[in-house]
Amino acid sequence: MANRYLHNVHGLFDTIAPNYDRMNNIISLGTHRHWRKQTMAQISLAPNAQALDLCCGTGDWTIAIAKELGPTGEVIGFDFSAPMLKIAQQKVTQAKLTDRVWLRRGNAMHLPFKTNSFDLVTIGFGLRNLPDKRQALAEIYRVLKPGAQLVCLETSQPDQPVIKPVWQWYFTKVVPFFGRIFAHQYQEYSYLQETTRHFVSYQQLVILFEQAGFEGVHYERFNFGAAAAHFGIKPEADHE
């Protein structure tokens, strides 16, 4: 079942890759850049840090991290979609960051990296698309160095009585409509809004972080709760 799920999701993101950036701007009304900027403001990176950006898509967050690093730092952008990574590579080259950005294709639930490898792991708008969130968080925990940070930026659900029905209407009706009009991909964007609606709440994600072993877990919500950034630290004492 998991393999079939992954195959279907792979195909979906391969299909939407050419329109991905434009549709992100349309669906979020451009606010996804603000969410990422606000999240980045809470990340402290040493110039020589080794970072991993999971589910990196077309590479925007990968590039933002790379710009914070010095020439001795490195960020790996990791994704399962070859078409997404192709676009990301074009952006990396255009930004003249090929000296500190490496792009790799693979499965975020089975990371091909050694234990205690990274000073930072980020995952933006990708955790909800993984069939086993706990397995993914366990792998992230494993590859982080003790004392290093996980940052997850993800769509979320507003819980204010006035905002929640508007949000539900927007994602169930408007988002698929935008997919049909602007990208001719109604089914694909119907799926994406479903993953957003059925993803765990921001409170439940805190619990998943803590169950994976992370400490100091906290979050920041954006746009009345339409998105949330979660932060967690791998304990210093954990040397596995």
Image (tube, grey):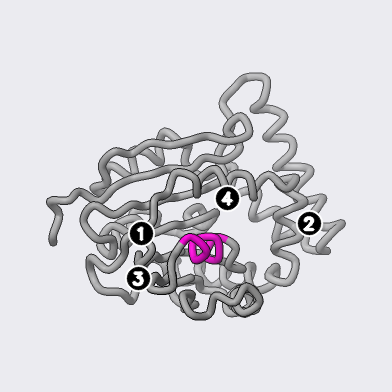
**On-image quarter of the C terminus:** bottom left
The residue stretch that appears in magenta: 61-68
Pointer 3 with pointer 2, Cβ within 8 A = no
Looking at the magenta stretch, what is its main secondary structure?
Answer: helix
User: Alpha carbon of mark 2 to alpha carbon of mark 1: how far?
Assistant: 40 Å
Q: Image height check: is 89 above or below 68?
A: below
Disc number at residue 237?
none
Label 3: how many residues lie within 10 Å, few (<14), some (14-19) or many (20+)?
A: few
Q: Residue at x 68, y 44 (%)?
A: 31
Disc number at residue 110?
3
Of residues 102 and 162, which is closer to you in this image?
102
Disc number at residue 179?
2
Q: Amino acid at mark 4?
A: Thr
User: Alpha carbon of mark 4 to alpha carbon of mark 2: how far?
Assistant: 15 Å
Disc number at residue 46?
1
Q: Which residue is mark 4?
A: 195
Q: Amino acid at mark 1?
A: Ala
Q: Quadrant of residue 165?
A: top right
Disc 2 vs disc 1: which is toward the camera?
1
Q: Image height check: is 70 above or below 207?
A: below
Of residues 43 and 81, which is closer to you in this image?
43
Where residue 163 appears, x then y in whole percent?
A: 67, 25
User: Alpha carbon of mark 3 to alpha carbon of mark 2: how far?
Assistant: 31 Å
